[in-house]
Image (spheres, helix red, strand yellow):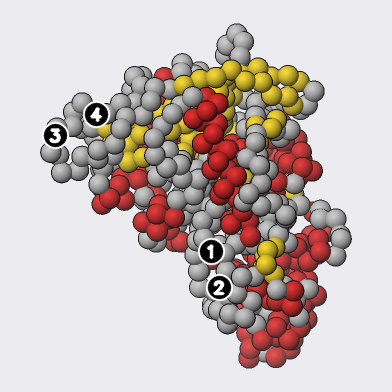
Amino acid sequence: MRRLMIVAAAAVALSFGLSGATGAWAADDAPAKSDAKDKPGDKDKIDLPPFPADASVKQVTHVAGKTLNYTATVGSLPVRDEKGKKIAEVVFTAYVLDGPRDPDRPVTFAFNGGPGAASVYLNLGAIGPKRVQFGAQGDSPSDSAKLVDNPGTWLDVTDMVFIDPVGTGFSRSLVDKDETKKRFYSIKPDIEYLSRTVYDWLLRNGRMASPKYITGESYGGYRVPRITYFLQTQLGVGIKGMVMVSPYLEPPMDQAPNFSPMTWVTTLPSMTAANYERQGKTLSPEQMREVEDYARGEFVTDLMKGRRDPAAVSRLVGKVTGYTGLPADFVKRSGGRIEIGAFLRELYRDTGKIGSVYDSNVTQDDPFPWSATGQRGDPILDAIIAPTTSAMVDFDTRVVGWKAEGRFNALSYDVGENWEKGVELTEATTDLRQAIAADPKMKVLIVHGYDDLSCPYFVSRLVIDQMPITGDPGRVKLSIYPGGHMFYSRPASQASFRSDVLQVFGAR
């Protein structure tokens, strides 16, 4: 089962070395423009108007009682092939604090996931200086796209650069479809060119000596350790810290659900958390400890015994019914193995609602309540595209004045559909372990929402529990907050997230 989740994409929707096919780029300090090396009539020539020169605007935001004056810049960086030909343009949004340059001020690079999601969700939802509301119960596509100060921003402790991979936001490929898939819609090239984009931004802006951090959400969280390790070992750029938001770290845990118990083990705690929340219970590590201990203990044992042991089946059906709040007859028919889609449909079947895979307690009316197959969108996914797209395009074109032509893809289904197959067999934990081992001073924060079924928090719990960590064991931390995939849509959870992040930056 593939659960390659973006902060957007379908409800159930992804070791390196520099390869000759994708590995040669050249930094370009000039504004993006059409490539003079292209000759008229080239068969792979893409006829697009040039991007405008980078544009900047002075802005102000407020956080934690402080007034922050900063410069917002929207621009692009070229991606070149091994012969120096420009093959893509990657758009970034940078926020840099005004005033004298502090050589010790960090810069953080941010990526969203998918593959197919622009960085707008981290930018205008979680950590940028301005935000628009999305992702919570009751949010609507027609809600105002007006930006307001973000109380969860990191700008007081770090400059930030939000990067949109090729095919997302305004970022674009300049080669044909087959070459685009080869160069950009594949796991290894994706890490390579995005790592080089980080390097090029640092070079262009004179920030090579600054402390550097990487953050990413969902598949962006999968990218984080891989980009970090590639920068460390291939491009010579050290990273002081990683923050992974609702990361998709270990795809193999999704595999072989009819044999391996891991699919059911990793999702049961999140289903339980959602049930506790519906009961009005406060979610906390103490509240969740019982089901976590059960999931990694008796639950695994009884799952592996299978239907040849009726007593084991009876035990797990009883336990799963109690933890999830689902009807006992449904749990019995499922053998205590609750598939995510069935869970979201069955949970609200009597009320004509459907739950979101990103937060099962966020619902909308089921447009096809009598459908046997559960035809459905996703309550969060359906509601976030409009406000985030409108807010980001308005910011780029009107506020900053970077007037690019073309469509802005907050979420590109085309990228997801054309992405390299086989990603469900690839994990990021290997590079996470190697990056941490290579730098004993590096700090890592992994964060999740309790209710997220797209990237369940218990996967990261199990991953960390198996990791050897040298030096201070507290330098790799897992924090979990009430909410789902975009827990930061809840003010209290965003505040807790910011507090934990400040520790990563040594600010508290």
Q: Which residue is mark 1?
A: 12
| Kind of residue at disc 4 | Asp
Q: Residue at x 74, y 78 (%)?
A: 350
**Residue 400, image x, y percentages:** 52, 24
Q: Which one is in front, 461 or 94?
A: 94
Note whether 110 is above or below 300 in the view shown: above
Q: Residue at x 60, y 45 (%)?
A: 387
**Residue 444, image x, y percentages:** 62, 39
Q: Which residue is mark 2?
A: 375
Q: Earlier in the sequence, mark 3 or mark 1?
A: 1
> Which of pointers 4 and 3 indicates the residue nearer the eye?
3
The local crowd at label 3, few if under 14, some if 14 to 19, many if 20 or more residues have their Cα within 10 Å, is few
Disc ID at residue 40: 3
| Kind of residue at disc 2 | Gln
Q: Earlier in the sequence, mark 2 or mark 4?
A: 4
> Which of pointers 2 and 1 indicates the residue nearer the eye?
2
Q: Are marks 4 and 3 in contact (CB under 8 Å)?
A: no
Q: Secondary structure at mark 1?
A: loop
> Which of pointers 1 and 4 indicates the residue nearer the eye?
4
Mark 2 and mark 4: Cα distance apart in space: 46 Å
The local crowd at label 2, few if under 14, some if 14 to 19, many if 20 or more residues have their Cα within 10 Å, is few
